[in-house]
Image (cartoon, helix red, strand yellow):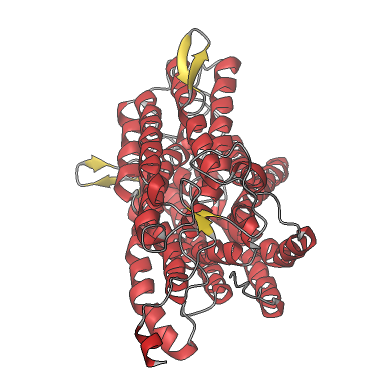
Amino acid sequence: MEAEALLPQPEKPLCAVDHLGRPASRGSSGGWPAAIFIIGVEVAERFAFCGIMGNLMIYLTGPLGQSTAAAASAVNAWLGAAMLLPLLGSAVADSWLGRYRTVICASLLYILVRHVLPHRASVGFGMLTLSTVLAPGEQAGCAGKAPGSAAGCSTSSSAQVALFFFSLYMVAFAQGGHKPCVQAFGADQFDENDSGELASRSSFFNWWYFASYGGNTVTVSVLNYVQESVSWQLGFAIPCAAMALALAVFCLGTKSYRFPQLPSAKKMPDDSEHAMLLTPSPRGDHGAIALLKLFPIWASCLIYAVVLSQWFTFFTKQASTLDRRIGTLVIPAASLQILVNASLMIFLPIYERVLVPLARKHTENPSGITTLQRIGVGLAISIVMVIVAALVEMKRLRVATKYGLLDKPEVTIRMSVLWMVPQYLLIGLSDAFAIVGLQEFFYDQVPGNLRSLGLALFLSIAGAGNFISSFVVYAIDRVSTSAGESWFSNNLNRGHLDYFYWLLALLSAIGLASYMYFAQLYVHKKKELIV
């Protein structure tokens, strides 16, 4: 017996294969070495996507000349589609193509080149660049207006506007395949049947969010500056190059990846050396029940998504009216969004290295607190954030009234943009709890062969929330316009974004109460040991 104890213990088998279809080795595949490659591709993809998203409100109300309400609705609708399309991408990945191949195809769709009109441009970002090249610019008399205050000044034709939006939705379609699969594939690199790797997987979600959003704190800010101060064409072309780099980084790590092989997996006759094709689990009813159990949590987080959708629409529009000088530099309004990333970069390491070990001593939970508790804290912080936003907007309107600027939207309000810093920091703090918690929760609580779909369900919260926001903005705009002045007037000094934020605070409180009720009733999935 003693001799047996001295013998090296056999390595626990992995239910995964390597890139050649051979049983994966724990020591030479997966884990953090593989995850770093996957995190790297996500950093580049988020730079590309957020570089477009961050300044979209300014581009629509500036060069394209849309009204404030119309632009906000358009952004919300586009983001809604971008966050709902992962349901399609994940279904393709989980039932047919596999996560690895889906990421490759989605990345190629981002950067694929083909002939469009008389020019050559990529289907996604390249066409976006082409649409800005073809846009003729602004009418005479509109030059010199503050960014975002030139609604109605564009001479862009309907065809040019249509090309721009078609390009945007191609980007959204590509993200639908990329976003859920790359994160699920990253989490797949950690074996949940090994206690050490399971704890690392929980950390993976923290560092994933830290790197993918915090890592772009400076780069997206620089890109926003290029778009506003140098060239929109160049500002939309840079993300195309970033996606090409992202694809190269992802392919470099192929030999180190683990490719999940669930008990229901079957190797197809035409399998390539890079991935296994998985057939759907025969326990379809079990998967459907698991997904239905998630619905109350999913629904109770929708208002949270509506609140978050404001920071790249109305928050950016507000910032464009304020004094944005820092020394001699005038910062782009969209650059304030880096404060969200900065907040994440500061807090997530504190959470991972300080709060989790402290909580672990009291709860004996490897993650410190449960994912549902973490989500609830994030929802509560979002209520504080939107209340702060309402108070700042009330002050902005008072300053505009004091200096007689109510009917002078082109004049910068004598109020520093630094007043908006707290609400951006609170968004990042809320994300660190709620968004990271939701990612881990939806990945962990679905069957193993549906984990891309689980993350797609998480993303669909943001998608549905953006569509709800778009509808609410449209409805309030119609009602308030018929009653006098729109809450979302093109002249924000005559609008009432403060009313809108107070409404969101009330709805958020109702959403938090419903979430707490359903979280208490939720029964977690039992771990399925794979032998």
Q: Nearer the viewer, residue 495 or 281?
A: 281
| Quadrant housing the N terminus | bottom left
Q: Residue furthest top?
A: 118
Give the residue at x 50% y 67%: 13
Say which quadrant the C terminus sits in. Answer: bottom right
Residue 330: x percent and y percent?
A: 27, 41
Q: Seen in the image, is 182 located left or right of residue 346?
A: right
Instruction: Depth check: give the residue in front, 158 or 282.
Output: 282
Q: Is residue 490 visible?
A: no
The residue drawn where x is 56% and y is 76% is 373
Residue 49 in the image: above or below residue 118: below
Residue 257: x percent and y percent? Answer: 43, 52
> Between residues 267 and 107, which one lies in front from this camera angle?
267
Q: Is residue 524 above or below residue 17?
A: below
> How many numbered discs?
0
Task: Using the image, determine if residue 487 lies above or below residue 106.
Answer: below
The residue located at (66%, 50%) in the rendering is: 464
The quadrant where residue 176 appears: top right
Residue 379 seen? yes
Residue extending farthest to the left is 328
- Relative side of 6 to 170, left or right: left
Name the residue at 41% across, 50% down. 38
In the picture, residue 451 is in which quadrant? Answer: bottom right
User: Residue 372: where, in percent of width, then height?
Assistant: 58, 74
The image shows residue 418 at horizontal and vertical percentages of 33, 55
